[in-house]
């Protein structure tokens, strides 16, 4: 079994998200509806695994197969459907990992993750707490 590494919040995470999202946006162009920073690294002050998660929402489900091939050609590793009609890809760069999720415009799992992220951002006292030793 592989150990999971959780680290203190790193103020460089928003910058890393901006860098990778700029690249993904350029790759997907006008087929991209939005790109969002999700997961633990998207919540200021929250400890997390040092993996930047981003969700790219396409303007139509019809563009997903082409989008997958475009980002695969940019050295992302394809991992398939997460079971929520979201397709996962990863790439490591300079000690950080990036997880990219591609989905269509009406994806419920994406909407739920955005609502949860925004709630934790707005109510940090409700977020995860360190486990007692």
Image (tube, rainbow, N blue to C red):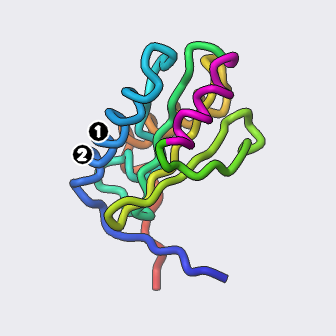
Q: Residue furthest front?
A: 73
Residue 48 location (% of width, % of height): 42, 62
Asked which secondary structure carries label 1, the reply is helix
Q: Residues within 10 Å of mark 2 (few under 14, many from 20)?
A: few
Mark carried by residue 18? 1
Q: Please tell me whether mark 2 sits on a helix, a strand or a loop.
A: helix
Name of the residue lying farthest toward the bottom: 133
The residue sitting at 77% across, 42% down in the picture is 83
Residues in magenta, as a range: 61-73
Name, please, the residue furthest toward the right. 83
Position of residue 51 relative to residue 111, above or below, is below
**Residue at image point 44% right, 64% down:** 49
Residue 101 appears in which quarter of the rendering? Answer: top right
* Residue on which the image places disc 2: 15
Pick the residue in front: 18 or 115.
18
State the count of labels. Answer: 2
Rendered position, 63 above or below 91 = above
């Amino acid at each position: 079994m592989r150990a999971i590494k959780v680290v203190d919040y790193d103020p460089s995470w928003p910058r890393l998200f901006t860098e990778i999202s700029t690249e993904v946006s350029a790759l997907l162009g006008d087929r991209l509806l939005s790109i969002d920073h999700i997961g633990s690294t998207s919540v200021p002050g929250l400890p997390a695994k040092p993996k930047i998660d981003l969700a790219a929402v396409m303007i139509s489900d019809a563009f997903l197969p082409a989008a997958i091939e475009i980002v695969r050609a940019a050295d992302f590793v394809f991992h398939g459907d997460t079971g929520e009609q979201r397709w996962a890809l990863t790439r490591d760069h300079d000690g950080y990992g990036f997880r990219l999720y591609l989905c269509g415009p009406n994806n419920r799992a994406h909407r739920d993750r955005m609502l949860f992220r925004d709630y934790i951002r707005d109510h940090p006292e409700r977020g995860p707490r360190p486990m007692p030793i």
